[in-house]
Image: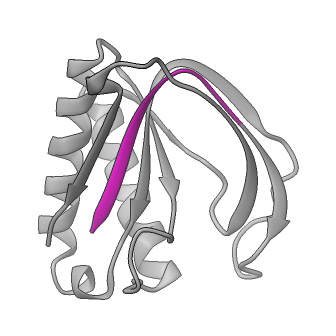
Amino acid sequence: MKMLMIYCDKFGYEPSVKTLKDFPDVREGNSLSDVLVGFIQAESQDEFDLKGVETKMIKNLKWAAKKNGTTRIVLHSFSHLSDSKATPEFTKKLFDQAEARLNRSDYEASQTPFGYFLSLDVQAPGNSQARIFKSFV
């Protein structure tokens, strides 16, 4: 898994182009403030250890959120961090499970629409903890 975590004063998105036909149609966007956004790419080798990858992902997201003083986390599928890609079905399952776990542990977690290119509005402060990259198996 590859994950770029960006703390945003403001993060907004609007669905632009649907890329995966087997996922729900979404027409509306959203805008959030004081939020950690995880730009996440699940890789093919991750499919052999869903629980382990999910746990590492959640630990890193919680750590970065605490570093930035927020409890809001957005999971965003971003398959541009590696040549290796997990299946969309695996990635969506991983995101759904991680979102549920985060919400059960006093975080306000959500996801961007899955299977879309999105128009993004990213307003991030210029400090070192606002941008963190992690790579793990």
Query: Residue at position x 18%, y 66% from top?
Result: 53
State the image coordinates of residue 74 (x, y, percent, origin top left): 48, 39
> Which residues are the magenta region?
1-12
Would you say 15 lies left or right of 123 here?
Answer: right
Is residue 10 magenta-colored? yes
Q: Main secondary structure of the magenta part?
A: strand
Quadrant position of residue 83: bottom left
Q: Is residue 46 above or below residue 51?
A: below
Quarter containing the C terminus: bottom left
Q: Is residue 35 above or below residue 19?
A: above
Query: Residue at position x 15%, y 66% from top?
Result: 136
Is residue 109 magenta-colored? no
State the image coordinates of residue 132 (x, y, percent, origin top left): 28, 40
Query: Residue at position x 29%, y 12% from top?
Result: 69
Query: Residue at position x 21%, y 20% from top?
Result: 67
Front position in the image: 64 or 47: 64
Front position in the image: 94 or 41: 41
Front position in the image: 81 or 44: 81
Q: How many marks?
A: 0
Q: Is residue 82 above or below residue 35?
A: below
Would you say 104 lies left or right of 63 here?
Answer: right
Q: Is residue 132 above or below residue 42?
A: above
State the image coordinates of residue 100 (x, y, percent, origin top left): 36, 45
